[in-house]
Image (cartoon, rainbow, N blue to C red):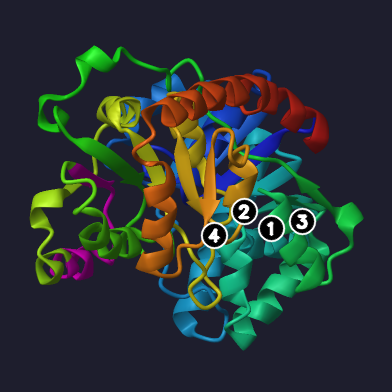
Amino acid sequence: MRKILLFSEIFPPTHGGSGRWFWEIYSRFPENSVTCLVGEHALAKEIDPDFPHVIYRSSLNSTEWGLRSYAGLRYYLKLWSRLRKITKTEGVSQIHCGRVLPEGLAAMLLNLTHGVPYTCYVHGEDVEVALTSRELKLLTQLVMKRAERIVANSQNSLRILIDKWQLPDHKVIVMNPGVDVAKFIPADPGLRPQKWIGKQVILTVGRLQQRKGQDMMIRALPILQGQFPNLHYCIVGGGPEKESLANLVSELGVAHMVEFAGEISDSDMVEHYQHCDLFALPNRRIGNDDEGFGMVLLEAQACSRPVLAGNAGGTRETLLVDKTGVVVDCTTPERLSAALNEFIGDTALLRSMGAAGRVHMEQYFSWDKLAEKAETLLK
């Protein structure tokens, strides 16, 4: 295998499904086959020694992803210079970019000056959002045209690339993210956290943004509380919608039913998955913003939890519909609450879905199996 430079702003300990995906896949690649250039983080020194390849940390964030402004041009020249030095020092012969923009554009500049080939990952929502800007659309087209290959995280993302970006299907490969089935495991229900004893818990893990649908679940609570008086909705994560969601909880008078857990540790995250009654990602499409895949749905199923996902984006690909979970219309609280009413009280059904989900994850989504597939596809 040609030596790879993994180039991604998002990488642990920064929270984000794509960063975890890169860590898990590339950590399983052969020794001396990978070098990383990833974003800075205050806690990086604590976890970088656990990664088996060389990691370079740098400030990779920018408010400008275009080239028309001086700030954007300066940003990309800085990235180009950093890439040039590392590829020479480490003997890199291919670059894998966490996104088309901004990482892919910097890699394209190096390709133009030094001929180093590059591959770009696509997550669905990134290329959808790029369609809303004439400049970003043009840059995205240029980057993908010169890329050696494009890696789509789902069949849904593949359809976007073919239908909306007219990419030839032979240039795109599909690689699903996975889950650590040794870390995300079922637990003894008797060990449930004290705060949840006596409650029927729905859990959502994810960034607080509109497409994730936390707001729609909150709106469904007043409809559900009459039939399910012990219903408790736990929201894990942070993001731009935090204040808006808190105001909505207050407005609807459901503060006694909602828990904002915020950003929590990995061990606490596993515990939350293990002891909820239902995991929900009530995602919906907002403008051009959609959920590309939904790794949190894999993590919940690995913990033997039944799942609910919205019928938008690529979340359907994470589960076996009506066997490990359900896919529902989450565009209104009435539709979401109606779907929940049908099965949230059926303990036996939830238990059987959870058990089936664990088997499904072990068979098709374990990182070890996916890493083997990735190594073969990316050769």
Query: Does any portion of residue 366 appear in the rendered image?
Result: no
Quadrant where the image shows the N terminus:
top right
- Give the residue type at disc 2: Gly
* Mark 3 surroundings within 10 Å by alpha-carbon count, few (fewer than 14), some (14 through 19), many (20 or more): few
The answer to whether residue 109 is left or right of residue 188 is right
Q: Position of residue 276 (x, y in %)?
A: 30, 32
Q: For marks 2 and 4, give the CA distance.
A: 31 Å
Q: In the rendered view, tell whether residue 375 sits above or below residue 359.
A: below
Q: In the rendered view, tell whether residue 332 sits above or below residue 265.
A: below
- Give the residue type at disc 3: His
Residue shown at the point (53%, 58%) measured from the top left: 291
Residue shown at the point (35%, 54%) measured from the top left: 207
Find out whether residue 244 is within the magenta segment. Answer: yes
* Mark 2 surroundings within 10 Å by alpha-carbon count, few (fewer than 14), some (14 through 19), many (20 or more): many
Question: Dot 2 corresponds to which residue?
Answer: 314
Which numbered mark, 2 or 3, is in the foreground of this view? 2
Find out whether residue 216 is within the magenta segment. Answer: no
Which numbered mark, 1 or 4, is in the foreground of this view? 1
Image marks 1 and 2: residues in contact by CB distance under 8 Å: yes
Q: Position of residue 8 (x, y in %)?
A: 53, 49
* Mark 1 surroundings within 10 Å by alpha-carbon count, few (fewer than 14), some (14 through 19), many (20 or more): many
Q: Nearer the viewer, residue 45 or 13?
A: 13
Bounds of the magenta segment? 231-248
Q: Which mark is residue 79?
A: 4
Q: Position of residue 252 (x, y in %)?
A: 15, 68
Residue shown at the point (43%, 31%) measured from the top left: 350
Q: Nearer the viewer, residue 51 or 333?
A: 333
- Give the residue type at disc 4: Leu
Question: Dot 3 corresponds to which residue?
Answer: 114
